Image: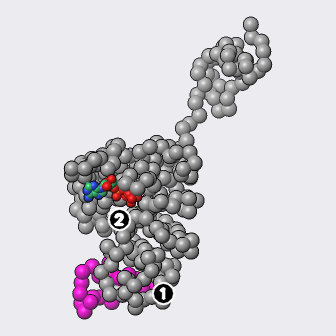
């Protein structure tokens, strides 16, 4: 006998109720579905496993990702970067990465988070070719990255090191900023900057708040200013993807806002960003997805 409070009935006798046609159809269920068929589950939310690497994001520890309409993106654009079952151990060391999956599309702003030593920098080094990636584990625009020379990757991916000092090669801020435009060409043999290059340089300096530091040695800048200079030096060259390794580390809110503004500008230009950070709470509202190691 089917009798009792509705909630209790649903819990104990759902199947019988369905067979008798006493359950309302879930909205959108096919009209011709036979009584007793299992209800069609709702579509899986579009972000989830493949947009996160390693462990799923623990509730409350990292903000929920702003989900992409993955299906629409799949048809609209191919991924720039695909990481598939990536496992990596340093020689003689324990595994730094295990079974990592991720995809980055044009226009993505991906936050790469995880505890100290979880392998964030290792992942970025593997992408850039500073460490040897296992065959088939990383693809750039569909091509196995293992066979791509480092300089070819650098032509398409800008990389900002965790330690800005690693990047400085010029005697002052202006020379440092434009260094990448000249490659290793000596100062006397360098070509004139185009008007567009000059404009981009001035724009980035303004956004970074470094316009009045042009003649200072990069090494004399404050730590936050050094980070901003290392970021804009990479942004001088348009790239499909920028990898920024902890660009906001040790920064005050104003400086973090500058980094955010710079990243937003690069997204507007169509680039994607992979940002390693221990401050996801400060940037989460701008991110399109997360990889948590
Ligand atoms: N050259 C190396 N040789 C051996 N082990 C290394 C080497 N570089 C890094 N590791 C180890 O690999 C692991 C991952 O390091 P990695 O720098 O990628 O972590 P991370 O997530 O970027 O850390 P953090 O948040 O502290 O910057 C760590 O256990 C580290 O000790």
Q: In this view, does 126 lie to the left or right of 58?
A: left
Residue 151 image point, x, y percent: 25, 67
Residue that label 1 marks: 211
Q: Which residues are drawn in magenta?
A: 176-203
When the figure is inspected, residue 266 is found, relative to residue 22, above or below; the finding is below
When the figure is inspected, residue 36 is found, relative to residue 83, above or below; the finding is above
Residue that label 2 marks: 157
Q: Is mark 2 within 8 Å of ligand 1?
A: no
Q: Nearer the viewer, residue 92 or 141?
A: 92
When the figure is inspected, residue 54 is found, relative to residue 256, above or below; the finding is above
Label 2 crowd (10 A; few <14 / some 14-19 / many >=20):
many
* The stretch drawn in magenta includes residue 101: no
> Helix, strand or loop at disc 1?
helix
> Helix, strand or loop at disc 2?
strand
The residue at the point 44 percent across, 43 percent down is: 55
Q: Which of 133 and 116 is in front in this view?
A: 116
The residue at the point 52 percent across, 45 percent down is: 58
* The stretch drawn in magenta includes residue 194: yes
When the figure is inspected, residue 242 is found, relative to residue 34, above or below; the finding is below
The residue at the point 56 percent across, 74 percent down is: 254
Q: Which residue lies furthest to the top in this view?
A: 1
Q: In which quarter of the image is residue 257?
A: bottom right
> Along the polypeptide, which appears first: circle 2 or circle 1?
2
């Amino acid at each position: 006998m089917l009798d009792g409070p509705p909630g209790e009935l649903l819990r104990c006798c759902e199947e019988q109720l369905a067979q008798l046609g006493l359950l309302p159809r879930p909205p959108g269920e096919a009209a011709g579905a036979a009584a007793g068929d299992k209800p069609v589950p709702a579509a899986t939310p579009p972000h989830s496993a493949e947009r996160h690497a390693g462990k799923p994001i623990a509730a409350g520890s990292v903000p929920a990702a702003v989900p992409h309409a993955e299906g629409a993106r799949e048809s609209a654009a191919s991924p720039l970067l695909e990481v598939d079952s990536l496992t990596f151990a340093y020689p003689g060391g324990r595994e730094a990465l295990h079974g990592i999956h991720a995809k980055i599309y044009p226009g993505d702003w991906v936050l790469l988070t995880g505890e100290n030593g979880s392998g964030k920098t290792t992942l970025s080094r593997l992408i850039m070719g500073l460490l040897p990636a296992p065959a088939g584990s990383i693809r750039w625009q569909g091509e196995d990255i293992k066979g791509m020379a480092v300089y070819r990757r650098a032509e398409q991916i800008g990389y900002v090191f965790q330690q800005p000092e690693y990047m400085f090669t010029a005697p002052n801020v202006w020379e440092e900023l434009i260094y990448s435009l000249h490659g290793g060409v000596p100062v006397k043999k360098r070509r004139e900057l185009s008007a567009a290059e000059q404009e981009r340089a001035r724009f980035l300096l303004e956004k970074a708040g470094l316009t009045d530091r042009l003649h200072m040695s990069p090494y004399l800048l404050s730590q936050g200013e050094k980070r901003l200079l290392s970021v804009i030096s990479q942004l001088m060259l348009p790239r499909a993807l920028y990898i920024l390794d902890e660009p906001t580390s040790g920064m005050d809110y104003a400086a973090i806002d500058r980094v955010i503004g710079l990243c937003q500008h690069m997204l507007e230009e169509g680039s994607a960003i992979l940002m390693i950070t221990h401050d996801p709470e400060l940037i989460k509202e701008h991110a399109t997805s997360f990889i948590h190691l």
